[in-house]
Image (spheres, rainbow, N blue to C red):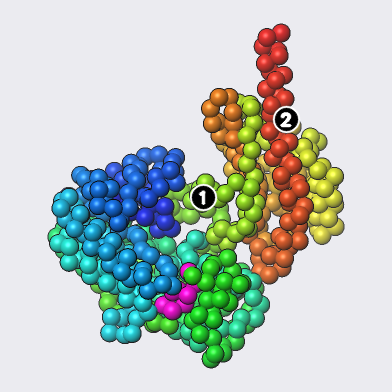
């Protein structure tokens, strides 16, 4: 019989956040555990949210009560040796509480690598966690994977940033190590399918994609898919520590996170045990190129969330944030308006065309002229209707990609750019007649030119985007005042 209630630890993490919707879609009752439950507010409306910590016995007991199976998706990521002891203590406590609570299965996602080799500290710790969970007395299904290819996977993001930003990459010897990267889509298929395995049986499954390639080949194949010309020059003097500092300088990934990842890359991580293909014949892992193509697809996925924007948790981005998340350069503005939600949404849904953009219109016109000069559409298209909006409508040099009347509008740029760009508006009622307006610009740069473009126009963004968000709020408040005057007049 399939489990009824499933506990997902690490619910705010990369894998947990994508696994939960699939479990719900499959008909399971899902309980999500996070150290800060507020981070999950509204994210999974059909799931039960509990606050808990894998180091806190009391909260673990509450989370494991009446649970049939549990996903253990937590681990430390640090360049300090203390992480091994912390991972060991957390796994021991979780396994004991799961057994005492009557949990029938634990599903754990670890890392590939042969136990008879000299593993990095992190890979060795990941294997040890699996051993501890199996020794708990609860049936444990452990999946061991190499690089997970997907937007948001830290190892994939490190490769993405390096390849996008460096036309010539000076690389250490570890880039010649063989690996078997696997798409996040296939990892999630395995994780969900594990719930249908026979109970009371512990087993390790090595999972990988269809291609066995070196990290150098991954970067070059990624570059080819992105139509980038890249060279990789291998030098012998790059130590893991030096490599991590280089990653820290070139990418948004800190040296603290990069170093353990780089140490792990020195180990050959390929599938040697074919058990996964025998026990999960319905899953046929895809190749690296297709996995990358899916990871770069910002419009749709084969997951319950229909687009990258739905899967991306914007609430984790600070107010008035300008920076990088999952390969996207983001400019996020937020302000409050003393106006109903539908009025705020009506204002941003009428932007463009003859009405303009409410703020810095002369700069918008200049940008339109520049686009025309480069062979783009410019501002000449205007909009079909000054007040009505539909999916697929043109709005100046934008196209309506997502539209929820009264709540959300997302526009995709059709101007000439060294990358892809979107502009999204969302209105959410927060009580007392106040609406929160969230305005977010997304830009996926294509190579170094795209990155330089974004930072070159950043001062104009600070002026235009900040002013436009405030202007929308002010206009919504004025419209609300006019409506109130008419109703009392």
Could you tell me residue 286's position as x and y percent? 42, 68
- Identified at 76% across, 57% down, the residue is 457
Which region shows up in magenta?
Answer: 257-264
Residue 26 in view here? no
User: Residue 52: which numbered mark, if any?
Assistant: none
User: Residue 316: which numbered mark, if any?
Assistant: 1
Query: Which residue is situated farthest in the top direction here?
Result: 489
Q: Is mark 2 on a helix, strand or loop?
A: helix
Q: Which residue in the protein does label 2 denote?
A: 475
Left or right: 204 as drawn, with respect to 381: left
Could you tell me residue 30's position as x and y percent? 31, 45
Q: Is residue 216 magenta?
A: no
Q: In this view, does 226 lie above or below 170?
A: above
- Give the total of numbered labels: 2
Q: Is residue 263 magenta?
A: yes
Query: Which residue is situated farthest in the bottom direction here?
Result: 236
Give the camera-side residue of 140 and 181: 140
Give the camera-side residue of 218 and 374: 218
Q: Is the magenta stretch mostly helix, strand or loop?
A: helix
Residue 348 in view here? yes
Quadrant where the image shows the C terminus: top right
- Identified at 31% across, 85% down, the residue is 117
- Identified at 72% across, 30% down, the residue is 475
Left or right: 365 as drawn, with respect to 320: right
Q: Quadrant of residue 189?
A: bottom left
- Identified at 71% across, 24% down, the residue is 479
Q: Is residue 367 above or below residue 292?
A: above
Could you tell me residue 452's position as x and y percent? 72, 65
């Amino acid at each position: 019989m399939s489990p009824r209630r499933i506990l997902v630890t690490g619910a705010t993490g990369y894998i947990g956040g994508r696994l939960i919707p699939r479990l719900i879609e499959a008909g399971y009752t899902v309980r999500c555990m996070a150290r800060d439950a507020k981070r999950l507010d509204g994210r999974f409306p059909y799931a039960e949210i509990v606050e808990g910590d894998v180091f806190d016995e009391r909260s673990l007991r509450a989370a494991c009560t009446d649970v049939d199976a549990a996903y253990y998706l937590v681990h430390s990521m640090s360049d300090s040796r203390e992480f091994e002891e912390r991972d060991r203590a957390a796994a021991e406590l979780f396994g004991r509480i799961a057994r005492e609570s009557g949990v029938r299965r634990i599903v754990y996602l670890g890392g590939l690598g042969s136990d008879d080799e000299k593993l990095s500290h992190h890979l060795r710790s990941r294997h040890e966690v699996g051993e501890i969970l199996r020794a708990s007395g609860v049936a444990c299904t452990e999946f061991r994977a190499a690089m997970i290819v997907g937007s948001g996977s830290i190892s994939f993001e490190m490769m993405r940033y390096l390849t996008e930003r460096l036309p010539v990459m000076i690389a250490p010897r570890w880039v010649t190590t063989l690996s078997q990267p696997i798409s996040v889509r296939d990892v999630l298929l395995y994780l969900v399918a594990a719930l249908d395995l026979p109970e009371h049986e512990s087993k390790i499954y090595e999972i990988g994609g269809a291609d066995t390639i070196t990290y150098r080949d991954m970067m070059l194949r990624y570059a080819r898919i992105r139509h980038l010309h890249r060279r990789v020059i291998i030098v012998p003097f790059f130590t893991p520590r030096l490599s991590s500092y280089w990653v820290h300088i070139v990418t948004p990934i800190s040296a603290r996170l990069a170093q353990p990842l780089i140490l792990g890359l020195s180990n050959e991580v390929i599938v040697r045990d074919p058990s996964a293909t025998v026990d999960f014949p319905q899953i046929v892992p895809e190749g690296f190129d297709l996995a990358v193509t899916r990871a770069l697809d910002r419009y749709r996925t084969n997951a319950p969330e229909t687009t990258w924007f739905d899967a991306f948790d914007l609430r984790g981005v600070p107010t008035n944030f300008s920076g990088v998340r999952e390969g996207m350069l983001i400019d996020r503005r937020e302000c409050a308006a003393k106006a109903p939600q539908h009025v705020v949404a009506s204002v941003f849904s009428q932007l463009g065309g003859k009405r303009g953009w409410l703020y810095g219109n002369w700069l918008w016109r200049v940008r339109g002229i520049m686009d025309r000069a480069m062979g783009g559409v410019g501002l000449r298209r205007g909009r079909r209707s000054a007040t009505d909006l539909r999916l697929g409508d043109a709005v100046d040099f934008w196209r309506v990609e997502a539209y929820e009347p009264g709540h959300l509008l997302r526009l995709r740029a059709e101007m000439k750019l060294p990358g892809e760009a979107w502009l999204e508006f969302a209105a959410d009622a927060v009580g007392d007649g106040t609406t929160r307006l969230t305005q977010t610009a997304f830009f996926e740069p294509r190579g170094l030119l795209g990155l330089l473009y974004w930072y070159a126009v950043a001062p104009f963004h600070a002026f235009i985007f900040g002013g436009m968000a405030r202007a929308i709020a002010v206009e919504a408040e004025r419209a609300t005042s006019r409506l109130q005057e008419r109703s009392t007049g």
